[in-house]
């Protein structure tokens, strides 16, 4: 694929985001597209955002479970960009109409104090560079159709990567915790929707240790002469299944000693 096509598809994604209306699957229109093409489209879309005044405040890592990787036909996670206007805090109301098919996942956010650069970045490097962790929810969305409107075929990982790895919003909350004060793989959380527990999990489900994905990302960015910078928010990957968010829903994620993240979704008439 040529750079001009990246830009055209980025413009489509931007319209889909602005209008909350998904576009046809990119992989169906460009069946020979590669993973590298997908990241090229994602990068072109983020450049549009930067031109509009948005700033990058971090990155997200997705597809961290082996089950999700097998289902997607890949052998490693994917990643996307977190922009300044994607950040919400526990207790806020999410405007439901802003999103297409919002779903909520439970994650750990790493807030960096020092840069991380590959190659050779390790889990210990991540722990040393982290200022603190925070409980977080990721809102994933789909600006590219999940199911093809004509065939019903589900989108693949190339569509998801192009779609900024499905990142829609990040909700932060709980209590900041230094990594030395937490047994990270054993951090557990339950996710309630309208007082009903929909899912629960432990952070070890994220590549055996949530910091592993952060090290992977630093190494993945190294060939592009990019690093993870101080102050950035890095979402390390979900350890629960996505739960659909509907107008009027209230979500409450309990992380035990790390506190809670609570959010509600506006009703259609608000």
Image (cartoon, rainbow, N blue to C red):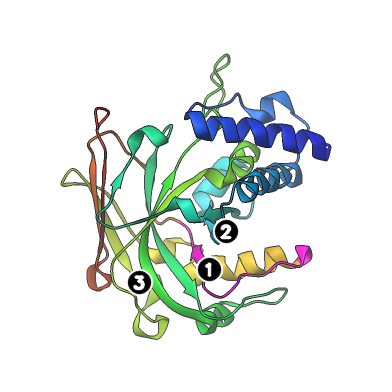
Q: Which of the 4 quarters of the picture holds residue 77?
A: bottom right
Q: Which SS class for mark 3?
A: helix
Residue 196 location, x and y as percent?
A: 18, 45
Mark 3 sits on what residue? Answer: 186
Q: Earlier in the sequence, mark 2 or mark 1?
A: 2
Q: Nearer the viewer, mark 3 or mark 1?
A: 1
**Quick one: which residue is furthest to the right in this view?**
2
Magenta span? 223-237
Q: Which mark is residue 56?
A: 2
Q: CA distance from mark 3 to mark 1?
A: 24 Å
Q: CA distance from mark 3 to mark 2?
A: 30 Å
Asked whether residue 116 is drawn in magenta, I would say: no
Q: Earlier in the sequence, mark 3 or mark 1?
A: 3
- The answer to whether any part of residue 155 appears in the image is no
Q: Which residue does the image show at 57% across and 57% down from the upper left?
A: 55
Q: Nearer the viewer, mark 3 or mark 2?
A: 2
Mark 1 sits on what residue? Answer: 232
- Which image quadrant: the N terminus? top right
Vertical side of 128 occupied by 212: above or below = above
Q: Which residue does the image show at 37% across and 60% down from the upper left?
A: 136
Q: Which mark is residue 128?
A: none
Residue 122 location, x and y as percent?
A: 61, 78
How would you classify the magenta stretch by its main secondary structure? loop
Vertical side of 206 occupied by 184: above or below = below
10 Å crowding of disc 1: few (<14), some (14-19), many (20+): many
Q: Earlier in the sequence, mark 3 or mark 2?
A: 2
Q: Which SS class for mark 1?
A: loop
Residue 52 location, x and y as percent?
A: 60, 46
- Which image quadrant: the C terminus? top left
Disc 2 to disc 1: CB gap under 8 Å:
yes
Q: Which residue does the image show at 53% across and 55% down from the upper left?
A: 82
Asked whether residue 235 is drawn in magenta, I would say: yes
């Amino acid at each position: 694929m040529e750079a001009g096509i990246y830009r055209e598809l980025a413009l489509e994604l931007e319209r889909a985001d602005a209008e909350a209306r998904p576009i046809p699957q990119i992989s169906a229109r460009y069946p020979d597209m590669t993973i590298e093409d997908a990241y090229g489209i994602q990068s072109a879309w983020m450049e549009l955002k930067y031109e509009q005044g948005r700033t990058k405040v971090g990155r997200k890592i997705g597809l961290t479970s082996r089950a999700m990787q097998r289902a997607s036909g890949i052998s490693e996670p994917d990643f996307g960009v977190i922009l300044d206007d994607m950040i919400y805090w526990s207790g806020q109301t999410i405007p439901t109409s802003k999103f297409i098919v919002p779903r909520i996942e439970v994650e750990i956010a790493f807030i960096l104090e020092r840069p991380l650069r590959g190659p050779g970045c390790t889990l210990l490097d991540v722990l040393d560079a982290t200022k603190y962790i925070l409980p977080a929810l990721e809102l994933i969305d789909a600006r590219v159709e999940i199911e093809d409107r004509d065939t019903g075929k589900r989108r693949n990982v190339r569509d998801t990567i192009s779609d900024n790895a499905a990142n829609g919003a990040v909700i932060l909350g709980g209590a900041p915790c230094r990594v030395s004060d937490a047994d990270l793989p054993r951090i557990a959380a339950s996710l309630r929707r309208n007082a009903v527990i929909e899912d629960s999990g432990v952070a070890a489900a994220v590549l055996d240790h949530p910091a592993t994905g952060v090290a992977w990302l630093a190494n993945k960015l190294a060939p592009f002469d990019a690093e993870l910078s101080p102050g950035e928010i890095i979402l390390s990957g979900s350890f629960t299944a996505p739960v659909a968010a509907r107008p009027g829903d209230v979500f409450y994620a309990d992380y035990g000693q790390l506190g809670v993240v609570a959010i509600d979704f506006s009703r259609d008439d608000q």
